[in-house]
Amino acid sequence: AFEVHEIVVPHIGHVPVAKGDFKYLPKQVQDFVTQWVDVCQPRAVYICDGSVEEAEEITAKLMERGTLHKLTKYPNTYICRTDPRDVARVESRTVVCSVDRYATECHTKDGAASQLAHWISPENMDAAMQERFPGCMAGRMMYVIPFSMGPIGSPLSKIGVELTDSNYVVLCMRLMTRVSHDIWRVLGNNEFVRCLHSVGCPRPVNYRVVNHWSCNPEKVIIAHMPDDRMVVSYGSGYGGNSLLGKKCFALRIAGRIAYDEGWMAEHMLIMSVTNPKGVEKFFVAAFPSACGKTNLAMIQPTLPGYTVRCVGDDIAWMRFNKDGQLMAINPENGFFGVAPGTNHQTNPNAMAALQRDCILTNVAETADGGYFWEGLEDEVDKDIPITTWLGKPYKIGSKENYPSSHPNSRFTAPAKNCPIMHPKWEDPAGVPISGIIFGGRRPEGVPLVIEAEDWKHGVFLGAQVKSEATAAAEFKGKQIMHDPMAMRPFLGYNFGKYLQHWLDMEKPGRKMPKIFHVNWFRKDQNEKFLWPGFGENIRVLDWMMRRVDGEDIAEPTAVGLVPKEGSINTDGLNINWKELFSIPPDYWKGDIHETRRYLEEQVGDDIPPVLRSELDRVEARVDAM
Ligand code: SAT
Ligand code: MN
């Protein structure tokens, strides 16, 4: 005779645990999972461990369903096409919850609608959640993703747990963050950032699912509760809306933690430049989304003898160490880069990173199993049949079904695939920053580079960042939008307080980095770019390095320091220096008055007094031009 053993499936309430050992999770995580299992009612819970086997299992499921499609040209690389209604961040539905409205928004002039963070009251937040979350995962799996922003266990890193009903999100989180079983041990009894995400499509679905991509565009909300260190996202599966470690955690929530703890969480790439003398300096740079941060972070310098290495392409966490040196880490583990425009000319290092282990979302496919997007015309067979991101046939050069890829189509690639990652890119101590660069797309009036006179003036330069709208969010057309510090979409608290926090970074004994503003996008009367950009940008970085070392190659103007004529190496280029560096008085008078109008309307009484006097000072000088 033999005994019959009952197979006991562990449960959370009455919901079975499909994978993983719930008992192993720290108590505070168990409570978090239990709470939302009760509300969302998934059919089962899947505790992720970050293993390769797990990725293979989930990839196979997504291929079976048709959400992912394997590209035969590159190993372990997949194409994904979303519902065309779910293609970018939704700024208008991105909100921050606080008891006091002015913890989130500024005291705007005459109650103007805030463009710098959108507030939601705790009552409205509760109602929004009540309307969406109960039962929202019915018939679906809830994945529990343990992740670290920054190297696992580093003192500068932070841990989060994302609950999601999207397995596409699981795969992308594995590329963009560090997902591992080890997180539970490192976390112990400590606090973590709570992330809750649902595509908002409980089963049975009573509408047509487009492209095997579940989403609920009418009900999208991306909400942040900085006091509770929590993010709640509903209705979208795309990018920054759903990979909650990225903009939601690493910028909006971390920004608030940084404010409380005296450090900085910024929308910045991190890179190093080594000159022919072997001297290396690190820079961070803040440009609005889709303005070329990824390209700059990975440039292939055209000047001989220079080496560029990449630490990160989107987010920098920075703090001054005990020696007064500003140190930066990249909290991410991968790149979520804009695909169109990326090619072997503009960014060979990104192309190298795209040879394996990637997910490409909303790009086109060539008949031989490769990817295609606008910008790759010279790198594939001209006659090859192409299928657009909308599944339509396309031929290079044809107007029909153009463009082949959505303008905000993206590649998701592991950082370690990039051949020029800095050997210290995962150093827990971070890398020492010598210069901070701001910039945007400014077709008119703004010179190639401006250097701030001091830290305060630099903060002002950052506050006046504007740029042509791009496809990274829902805005249309070529309007020039304010995007102060390139943070407009990513603020987690009152922007006046944020500016004061920047000003407060300057303290005796600290080595304040130099601050610059660049514009690669100035055009002449014939709409032609005045500067070649991309690899040639090394020439501007070289000038900045020499400025950091105090070389006498800058001269004052009303708007800041600019290069003395000829002090940027333009050998071999055909450059109209006068036009590239001109500061047209009429343009700048209009611009500075417009900046004042914007700051007074949007930041209002929250404008820090020091920043206001910078504005007055610069405006008086510009008016006297
Ligand atoms: O916010 S996303 O991560 O979707 C991309 C961006 O805007 O930089
Ligand atoms: Mn970004």
Image (cartoon, grey):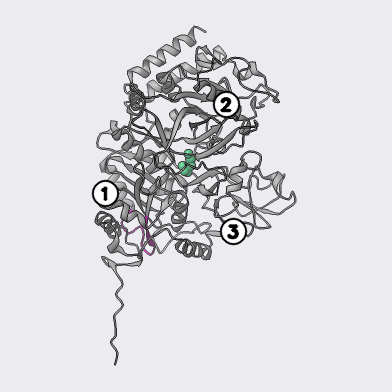
Which residue does the image show at 49% across and 56% down from the upper left? 213
Residue 527: give x, y in percent of width and height.
Answer: 66, 26
Q: Quadrant of residue 167?
A: bottom left
Q: Nearer the viewer, residue 422 or 9?
A: 422
Q: Quadrant of residue 342?
A: top right
For marks 1 and 3, the one nearer the N-term is 3
Q: Main secondary structure of the magenta part?
A: loop
- Of the two numbered discs 1 and 2 in the rendering, the one whose residue sits closer to the viewer: 2
- Of the two numbered discs 3 and 2 in the rendering, the one whose residue sits closer to the viewer: 2
Residue segment shown in magenta? 133-145
Q: Which mark is residue 75?
A: 3
Give the amino acid type for the residue marked by disc 2 in the picture: Asp
Q: Secondary structure at mark 1?
A: loop
Which residue does the image show at 40% across and 58% down from the upper left? 165
Q: Which mark is residue 190?
A: 1
Disc 2 residue crowd, few under 14, some 14–19, many 20+, Cα 10 Å: some
Residue 432: give x, y in percent of width and height.
Answer: 44, 32
Residue 138 located within the stretch drawn in magenta: yes
Give the amino acid type for the residue marked by disc 1 in the picture: Asn
Q: Is residue 149 above or below residue 581?
A: below
Q: Quadrant of residue 375?
A: top right
Quadrant into which the N terminus falls: bottom left
For marks 3 and 2, the one nearer the N-term is 3
Give the residue number, with chain letter if any, for mark 2.
542
Q: Is residue 532 above or below residue 169?
A: above
Q: Horizontally, is 83 left or right of 454 in the view?
A: right
Q: Is residue 155 above or below residue 214?
A: above
